Image (cartoon, rainbow, N blue to C red):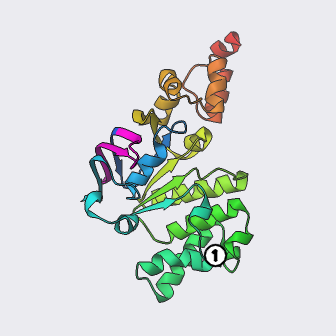
Amino acid sequence: MTELIRFDDVSFAYPNGHVAIENVSLSIAAGEAVAIVGQNGAGKTSTAKVMNGLYKPSKGDVTVAGENTKSRTTAQISRKVGYVFQNPDDQIFHNDVYSEIEFGPKTLGFTGSELEDRVYAAAELSGVSAQLDENPYNLPFSTRKFVAIASTLAMGCEAFILDEPTAGQDLAGMETIGRIVESLKAEGRAIVTITHDMQFVVDNFERVVVMANKHIVADAGKREIFWNLPVLEEAMLKQPYLSELANELQLDGRVLELDEFVQSFRRPQAVERV
């Protein structure tokens, strides 16, 4: 896969001197889905904001599609790496949903039917086609999150960052987010999520980056991460609920999925232990 985002020994400090991330090295390829997990203050959001140029590294280099972010404006980088904020109210500023979704691709120079196609496609994928004439602030918080997602999708970026996308979502919303992730992966776009929802990670992401104390402490496949108990303890994270239950029952296999749990539970040795 083609490398899209690269961190080389990157640190970032705020103007007051507070260090948010330290000595982070990371590579994300086109079409890759990566979940960044860790407790509040671990450095997740700062890492993501460095990816799309909202923050510039204090040390080290970040490249996006081969271009060093230090030599590009935030606006230039955001055309390649879209960012959906945790709070959609930090992102929404138009009086109707259509105008909100239209704004990004319109600023990129799209017009006419191509612009309309982008708006309608993003709205459909995000499940807000019926709300295009509505004022976003008349919509529930969970729906406003999808308006913010649609406005970023319409830009057609090479990479997308979703900050806590499942917060405040019901089952239908979770399923819609899952479809969005799968659609982006199928199109060969990179997708990065920052999340505390470990089940969302299990269901939609193969690679997991664990952060703690401003550093990356592990970067591996989800099964390896969620059964590496010392790493989870260091990052103060819990296993997904099925893995945690399987661990309590001492079932064989590094269980992540429901069918794996059932199969492990039915094995004679598992039944004997129970």
The residue at the point 52 percent across, 27 percent down is 232
The residue at the point 38 percent across, 43 percent down is 17
> Does residue 253 sit above or below 216 in this rendering?
above
The residue carrying mark 1 is: 97
On the image, the x and y values in percent for residue 126 come to 61, 65
Residue 10 is one of the magenta-drawn residues: yes
Is 165 left or right of 45, judged from the image as shown? right
On the image, the x and y values in percent for residue 87 come to 61, 57
On the image, the x and y values in percent for residue 1 come to 32, 51
On the image, the x and y values in percent for residue 68 come to 26, 57
When asked about the image quadrant of residue 251, the answer is top right
Quadrant holding the C terminus? top right
Residue range in magenta is: 1-22
Q: Main secondary structure of the magenta part?
A: strand
When asked about the image quadrant of residue 98, the answer is bottom right
Q: Nearer the viewer, residue 215 or 173?
A: 215
The residue at the point 36 percent across, 49 percent down is 28
Which residue, as the protein is rendered here, is positioned at the far bottom? 112
Q: Nearer the viewer, residue 47 or 199?
A: 47
Say few, some or many: other residues with alpha carbon within 10 Å of mark 1 (under 14 / 14 to 19 / 20 or more): many
* Disc 1 residue type (three-letter): Val
Residue 85 is one of the magenta-drawn residues: no
Q: Is residue 125 visible?
A: yes
Which residue, as the protein is rendered here, is positioned at the far top? 272
When asked about the image quadrant of residue 215, the answer is top left
- Element class at badge 1: helix
The residue at the point 40 percent across, 35 percent down is 216
